[in-house]
Image: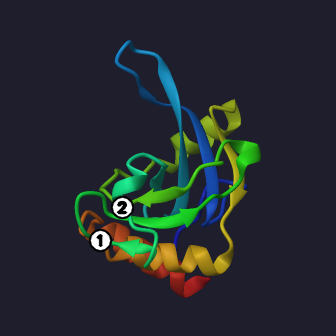
Amino acid sequence: MPGALPKGLKPGTLLRHSRFYASANGELLPKFLLALAPTRGGDVVFRVLTSQHAELRPEAPPCHHGNPYPGFYLGVLDPSVGLGKKSWLDLRGLEDADGIELAKLLDAGIVAAVGELALATLRAAMECAAGAEDTTQAQERAIRDQLAAL
């Protein structure tokens, strides 16, 4: 049985993290993320959305586990929140988010929910992410537990 996501989130929630990474000059920059599943320990499995290297990323089939960029094609999601380009779920490995820290970032407005994926797209993206080479066994278990609960 899957754990619980921070209040107000559910699998398929699109998030905008306003301080996700630092630029070369140290400026903190935003990134969009997709919440996939809670872990049994209270963390959250998520993956980054990207529009980079679109010319090297296949659109069909949407699930691509090959090189150089494994990903799941999501299409153009929502221009009104900054997702106006073709986007992919980046399937390269990413550490889970600490559930307590994520809840604090949500409360502080540093991370904000900006939308959610349609259920059919979410299921396909989760299946793809669960089978990705860089997905850990614990992440795969959390994703598959969540898929069974959907």
Relative to 90, residue 2 above or below: below
- For the question of whether residue 55 can be seen, the reply is yes
- Sort mark 2 into few (<14), some (14-19) or many (20+) by Cα contacts within 10 Å: many
Residue drawn at x 36%, y 67% as measured from the top left? 139
Left or right of 8, for residue 133: left
Q: Amino acid at mark 1?
A: His
For residue 65, the mark is 1
Q: Secondary structure at mark 2?
A: loop
Residue drawn at x 42%, y 46% as measured from the top left? 52
For residue 91, the mark is 2
The image position of residue 119, as x and y in percent, is: 66, 77
Q: Amino acid at mark 2?
A: Leu
> Would you say the residues marked 2 and 1 are in contact, meaning their CB atoms lie under 8 Å apart?
yes
**Residue at the extreme right of the image, as rendered:** 80
Label 2 or label 1, whichever comes before in sequence order:
1
Q: Quadrant of residue 56?
A: bottom left
